[in-house]
Structures are given as structure tokens and as C-alpha cells.
Amino acid sequence: MIHALIFDFDGLILDTETPEVQIWQELYARYGQEFPLEEWVRTVVGATVANLDPLAQLERLTGLPLDHQALYEQAHRTRLDWQAVLPPLPGVADYLDSARRLGLRLAIASSSPHGWVDGYLRRLEFWNLFDAVICREDAPRIKPDPDLFLAALSAIHVRADQALAFEDSPNGVKAAKAAGLRVVGVPNSITARLGPLPADLTLASLSDLALPGLLSRFGDSLALRPEMPDDLPGIRLVEEAAFAHHNEANLVDLARARGKSTLSMVALQDGRVLGHALFTPVTFDPPHPGRRGPSTGLRRERSGARSGRGLGLGPIAILPEFQRTGIGSRLMRAGLEHVRRLDYGFVVLLGNPATYSRFGFMPGRAFGLSSDYGDGDEFQVLELRPGALTGSARKVKYIPEFEETGC
């Protein structure tokens, strides 16, 4: 099963390479020369160091002395101006959005410095989508060595066989392969001149194949979505199989019947329900300052009105034969992403801190919160919206169906 996607940046997310080539092509044309594009692509793109000095090459071709400093500064300014308005390459935004919905972790492994990559990610509003951004400062060696990819895998706690890399250049593919990753090649208009990439799968563009279809090509057909009527028998089976008694299964059915199920998320493979997660409303005692009671959730309020409201996660259950396969992690991340998009501010749960801290959960007492189940380490909170839990110490109240069913 695939748990993560690791992306190159230059030429894969943003086509920063084409503007630079165009600048040199225009300069060479002013002197009646043709820019050595094939040599540039072969020796510069994706290389550890730039092995072609375009101005020194132009001097050799023309026999004329050139003001290197002035021309390099002009080229640099022009390049930044062009790149400042570049959109992401086709399909990139859709892939990132789909990956979050499918509970996949995301990372970048780039030979460029943070000062370059981070700024563009913020401009594109991609920064918060990535779990790790690994750049040249974060590894001993850069591509074609595997160190950047190894650092990315370590940062997101994923094995190489559980991730896919996306690269546009031969050096990038070589680095990813050396790290043990399977690689999707997506050459751009510049790197395509180097011939076929030695990748496991090559696409002309990420817009050519949606992410679920690509995952299926690599043997991952897990679907994650809100429940549908046909899923209900399978959900009941999962809950009964995962727990020693039927309390959790009864809670799910009762919450659904009474309209208390904010989100019932399923993980399916070939139509079979393998996992289930339930999110239900929680309230505060005393009430959150300035917030109305739970009935306001039936009315769509101004943007951000739900950001101070929270949900309880649980039960979350996986069929015993599929536990410890990563399905639970994918289901957890997909569910959290779904409720984040519904503009809820926080999620609480009861569980092993060592397990749920990996998803960003912290003890509730760090936010001044307790629950009917106490305020020990097992009562944990994840703030989906910064500042959603500001205020005095309060108790979180679960829906009464928890008590009714003995959960």
C-alpha cells in the first residue's frame, strides 16, 4: 500500500527551467548564435553543479568580450520576474488535493535551497499541504545521490516501498531509484529532450491520469469516502470484528439513526469495507465563549463560523486481518482532511498517545480541556484551525449516545 508521495520541485511542480532557457536563447540570438540547448539540458538540468557557463560559451562562439556581471544580473532579474507569475504545471494542484483526500502524506525533495522552494510554495498556497520540505541544506549530498529522498522518507516516517517519487529529470529519477523508491516520470518541455526517463511509469503530464488511477497502476486501489447506504452492513461487520463486544457497533448505528453522525468515513477495497471511522459533535461545559449551542450546526453561518466547534473521533476500526497495514493511518488522515474542509476547528479522541501523536494530537490538558473520561494522556486533541481552542478551561462533552451504549 502507498502511504506517501514525494515530489521534485523545479520542473515538476513549477516550470522554473523553461524561463531560464528562454532568456539565454534570446541573448544568444542577439549575437547571431544558437544557444546549446542539448548540452545545457544534459549538463545543467538536475545536476549537482552547473557544468555549462552560458556567457563563457557565448564569448568563445563570438570572440567578443562580455560584461558577465551585468548580463548575469539582468538575466537573474528577468528570470525572477517571469517565474513570479508562473502557475503550477498541469495536474499538480489536482494531485495534491486528491492526495490529501486519500490520506496520503506529502513531501518535497529538491536540490534547490529553501530560500527558493519555500517562497514559491507559499505563493502557490501549497506550503501547508506538505508534511516535509527537504532541500539541499537538509542532506549531505543532492541529486543524483539519494540523500534528499532518504531524508524525506525519514521526515515523514515512511519506508521506500510505501512511497512514490515524482521526477522530471534523469538525475532525479536516478536519485529516487537509489533510495529504493518507485518513480513516476513527468518530463517537461526541457527535460523531454533527454529522451525517455528510466522511470517505472512516465506521463506526459500529471493531468493525463488522475491520482486514483495512478495509484491503481501501482497496486493500490484503496478508496476512502463518506459512507453510502450500501456500506452499512460492512460497517457493522467491521465494528463487531474489531472490538470484543458490540458497544461500538451499536453506537455507530444509534448515532446515525439520531442524526448525530457528522462524518462516517469508510475505507474500501473492491467494494468491501475494510475500515470505518466515526466523527460526532462535541460541546463544551461551560459553553465556548461567544458560541451557540449544537443546534446552530444545522444552519450555514458566515465563513469560519464552525472553526471554534469540534468533533469527537471514535470509534475507528479496521478488520483484524487488515490491521497494521496502514489502512488505519490513511483512514485517519482522510477523515481529518474531510472535517477540516467542513471548517471544524478541532477533533478530540481517546486512545494511545504514542499512536495518535503521529497525526498531531496532543493531551487535552495542554489546551485546558478535560472530558467525562478524565484528563489523562489518553484524552487527546488536534487543533485543525489555529486558535480554535483559545479560552478558559472547559470540559468536552460527547453525545449522550456514548453513555447509552456503554462506550
Image (cartoon, helix red, strand yellow):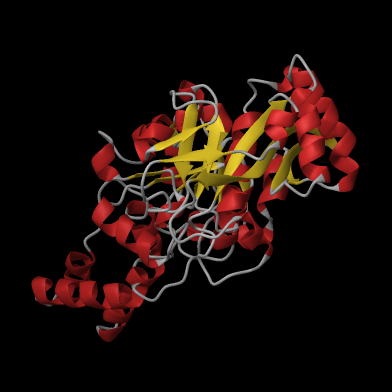
Q: Nearer the viewer, residue 211 or 127?
A: 127
| Residue 327: quarter of image | top right
- Residue 107 visible, this orientation: yes
Of the 4 image quadrants, the one containing the C terminus is top right
Q: Please give the count of numbered marks on the rendered protein.
A: 0
- Tell which residue pokes out farthest to the top in this image: 244
Side of 374 relative to 338 (left or right):
left
Q: Is residue 275 above or below residue 96?
A: above
| Residue 376: quarter of image | top left
Q: Is residue 3 above or below residue 18?
A: above
Residue 228: x and y in percent read 84, 48
Residue 402: x and y in percent read 69, 32
The residue located at (54%, 24%) in the rendering is: 351
Side of 114 relative to 253 (left or right):
left
Side of 355 relative to 203 (left or right):
left
Q: Is residue 370 above or below residue 242?
A: below
| Residue 317: quarter of image | top right
Q: Nearer the viewer, residue 270 or 88?
A: 270
The residue located at (51%, 21%) in the rendering is: 352
Of the 4 image quadrants, the one containing the N terminus is top right
The residue located at (83%, 44%) in the rendering is: 257
- Residue 144 visible, this orientation: no
Residue 356: x and y in percent read 50, 29
Residue 59: x and y in percent read 16, 71
- Tell which residue pokes out farthest to the front in this image: 286
The residue located at (62%, 51%) in the rendering is: 338
Q: Nearer the viewer, residue 58 or 152?
A: 152
Q: Nearer the viewer, residue 279 or 376?
A: 376
